Image (tube, rainbow, N blue to C red):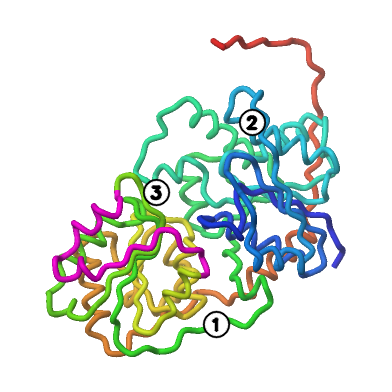
């Protein structure tokens, strides 16, 4: 294998509180590639306050030889939704890497890919667009409509990035099918590579969860908002026979939302459980997983729609018993023989029935993974070794100059 200079472009990274699924996947990929001999930089786009990283993840990046660079915001770029793509382009052309792996969301690779298409820069750099979910998909997850000019403009940048990429990768087949159904330019060569597991990326043994016997804790695991299923979880719990909830603790692990603050959640719980409910909105990822690994805990992830959620993948990896909804790419994470037992439709009735089955089972066992964890690492190592930039198409000389005047 030849050592390659690889830049992974992300919006956030592990080592700070509140990092989501995309940032987790990008960080684990960076560490895994660095551990296998590549020169890796994790380039974090502007837009979020990153702050200091935890000592644990600082050591993980350093031991893998991963360089962290946070891009400074340029407030003078107009329109503002193209600021981050332009800032990323400015950094990449300083010292072009061999391979860029860039998230689809926000169209972070748009300016660099356009520059390469025009033959102006980065002509020797290969681009891999990593599909965690563009803005349009995230709007669908949250049951919202992209109703601003900025969101439509960002969508054009995201779509164009897919069309200009050398390779497109998605963690789920479902996401590729969703984009094709909505006429996004997904190439037939697009690949499905599931997210790397932490144990695989770090080269550490997988830490299983001890069998705690019956279920004594129900833990909602995910952001406390509509798209993650907080409403149907609360409705499902209220449908359970009161006897099933005797001695059962309710736990909520996820960041708060404006529509579902702590008080609203507590008021929606059955009276006999409301007093014993715990709502933890500020735990680090490692702390939340430690809570879920306590014996007798059942994680519940009733998303209305999701791509390849790390909440489910982490429960599979660490043998944490769970119930989730059979939506989006979630079934692709779970062994088919376990689908009927741990997956249900995203309705309060179906969730209540699944919870009742788990609570009455004296040994509710964890689900098994659909694929071996090493497959994803092998696929990425093969990809970054083989990918090459597409030949630039002939570019016609400019004959006209267009000036667009705005209201600023």
Location of residue 205 with respect to 159 vertically, above or below: below
- Disc with the residue nearer the chain's start (2 vs 1): 2
Q: Position of residue 288 (x, y in %)?
A: 45, 69
What residue is pinned by disc 1?
Answer: 207
Q: Residue at x 48, y 51 (%)?
A: 177
What residue is pinned by disc 2?
Answer: 83
Q: Nearer the viewer, residue 152 or 20?
A: 20
Find out whether residue 345 is within the magenta segment. no
Per the image, label 3 sits on a secondary structure element best described as helix
- Mark 2: few/some/many CA within 10 Å (<14, 14-19, 20+): many
Location of residue 26 with respect to 277 vertically, above or below: above
Q: How far apart are marks 1 and 3 (CA)?
A: 31 Å
Q: Residue at x 37, y 35 (%)?
A: 145
Q: What stretch is highlighted in magenta?
A: 260-286
What residue is pinned by disc 3?
Answer: 141
Q: Distance between the residues labelled 3 and 2?
A: 25 Å
Location of residue 83 with respect to 311 vertically, above or below: above
């Amino acid at each position: 294998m030849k050592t390659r200079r690889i830049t992974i472009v992300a919006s956030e990274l592990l080592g700070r509180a509140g990092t989501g699924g995309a940032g987790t996947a990008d960080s684990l990929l960076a560490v895994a590639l660095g551990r296998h001999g590549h020169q890796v930089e994790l380039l974090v786009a502007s837009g979020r306050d990153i702050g200091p990283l935890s000592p644990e993840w600082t050591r993980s990046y350093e031991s893998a030889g991963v360089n962290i660079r946070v891009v400074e915001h340029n407030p003078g770029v107009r329109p503002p939704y193209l600021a981050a793509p332009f800032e990323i382009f400015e950094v990449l052309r300083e010292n072009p890497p061999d391979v860029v792996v860039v998230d689809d969301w926000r169209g972070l690779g748009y300016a660099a890919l356009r520059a390469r298409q025009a033959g102006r820069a980065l002509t020797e750099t290969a681009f891999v667009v990593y599909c965690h979910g563009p803005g349009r998909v995230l709007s669908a997850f949250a049951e919202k409509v992209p109703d601003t000019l900025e969101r439509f403009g960002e969508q054009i940048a995201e779509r164009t990035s897919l069309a200009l990429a050398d390779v497109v990768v998605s963690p789920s087949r479902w996401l590729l099918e969703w984009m094709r159904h909505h006429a996004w330019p997904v190439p037939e060569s697009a690949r499905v590579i599931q997210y790397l597991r932490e144990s695989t990326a770090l080269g550490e043994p997988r830490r299983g969860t001890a069998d705690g016997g019956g279920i004594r804790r129900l833990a909602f695991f995910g952001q406390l908002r509509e798209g993650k299923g907080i409403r149907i979880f609360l409705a499902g719990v209220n449908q359970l026979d009161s006897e099933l909830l005797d001695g059962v603790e309710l736990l909520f692990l996820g960041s708060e939302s404006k529509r579902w603050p702590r008080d609203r959640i507590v008021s929606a719980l059955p009276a006999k459980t409301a007093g014993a409910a715990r709502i933890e909105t500020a735990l680090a990822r490692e702390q939340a997983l430690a809570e879920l690994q306590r014996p007798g805990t059942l994680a519940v992830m009733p998303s209305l729609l999701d791509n390849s959620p790390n909440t489910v993948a982490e429960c599979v990896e660490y043998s944490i018993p769970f119930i989730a909804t059979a939506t989006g790419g979630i079934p692709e994470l779970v062994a088919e023989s376990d689908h009927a037992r741990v997956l249900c439709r995203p309705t309060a009735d179906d969730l209540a029935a699944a919870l009742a089955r788990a609570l009455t089972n004296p040994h509710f066992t964890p689900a098994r993974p659909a694929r071996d964890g090493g497959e994803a690492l092998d696929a990425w190592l093969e990809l970054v070794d083989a990918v090459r930039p597409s030949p630039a198409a002939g570019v016609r000389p400019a004959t006209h100059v267009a000036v667009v005047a705005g209201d600023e």
